[in-house]
Amino acid sequence: MLKIAIVAFLLVTARTADAECRYQNGYYDPGFDGACVAETSAPAGCPVHFVTPRAQAAAMFTVHRGTQDITLPAATSLVETVGVPLSLVDPIDCDCARTDATVLFDRQALMLTGAIAGDAVEFASGHLYVPQIISITAAGPCPAVAWPTQFQVATQCDRCPREPASSASCSMGGGGGGGGWLAAAITLGLVARRRRRDGKP
């Protein structure tokens, strides 16, 4: 199976989290979603920041406090939308066709009321390669945001196993395949044996 990784770089800045937003998909799971966090920690009382593909409806998240999942008042706001040039691979195309496009990503801020040091905010990672978690630390000045600088889409795009044409999934039609004549021959042979056993010519 062929895997193609396409990487796009934005303005490079220092960042406390992994500077890479790495998505991965394929024929059986072709989606492209997930909230990529901009920091691994944030002071209590400060917003946490993340990036999502523009086409994604909303970012889902869970707040953990110790061993419990809790619900806090939350408000999400759009900071800005940026365009990332990517050469996307069609995961269901046997030839791994590429399309050059500018993919829009939303930079967003999430404000949680009542978050305290020790809490953790875990975003639904979707098709991102690693979990996306921000730890809440003691209250303090809100640091400047260092947004993700690198975007990658790793696509397993080889839908068709490279087998002989008679059995390759891409070349077979929907109405039968090469096994029909064999089944008919076996059936005729069984009928002939039964007739001879019964004393019929």
Image: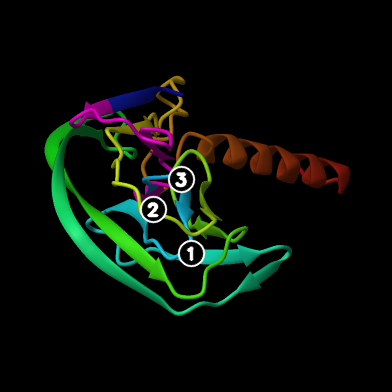
Residue at numbered disc 3 = 28
Image quarter for residue 74?
A: bottom left
The answer, for residue 95, to whether it is visible in the render is no
Along the line of sight, which residue is nearer the eye, 198 or 32? 32
Say whether disc 3 or disc 1 marks the residue closer to the N-terminus.
3
147 horizontally vs 162: left or right: left
Please give the range of residues in magenta. Answer: 7-36
Q: Which mark is residue 61?
A: 1
Amino acid at circle 1: Phe
Marks 2 and 1 sit apart, C-alpha to C-alpha, by 9 Å
| x and y, in percent, of residue 9 in the image | 22, 28
Q: Amino acid at mark 3?
A: Tyr
Q: Residue at x 41, y 22 (%)?
A: 2
Tag 2 near tag 1, CB within 8 Å: yes
Helix, strand or loop under label 2: loop
Which comes sooner in the sequence, label 3 or label 2? 3
The amino acid sitting under disc 2 is Ala
Q: Earlier in the sequence, mark 2 or mark 1?
A: 2
The disc label shown at residue 35, or none: 2
Q: Please name the colour scheme applied to the rendered image.
A: rainbow
User: In the image shown, does 51 or 29 lie closer to the viewer?
Assistant: 51
Rendered residue at 26%/68% (across/down): 77
Where the C terminus falls, by quadrant?
A: top right
Task: Report helix, strand or loop for mark 3.
Answer: loop
| Disc 1 crowd, CA 10 A, few/some/many (<14, 14-19, 20+) | some
Residue, x 87% and y 43% (percent of image)?
Answer: 197
Is 6 covered by the magenta stretch? Answer: no
Residue 3 image position (x, y, % from top left): 40, 24
Res 169 visible: yes
Q: Is residue 98 shown above or below 120?
A: above
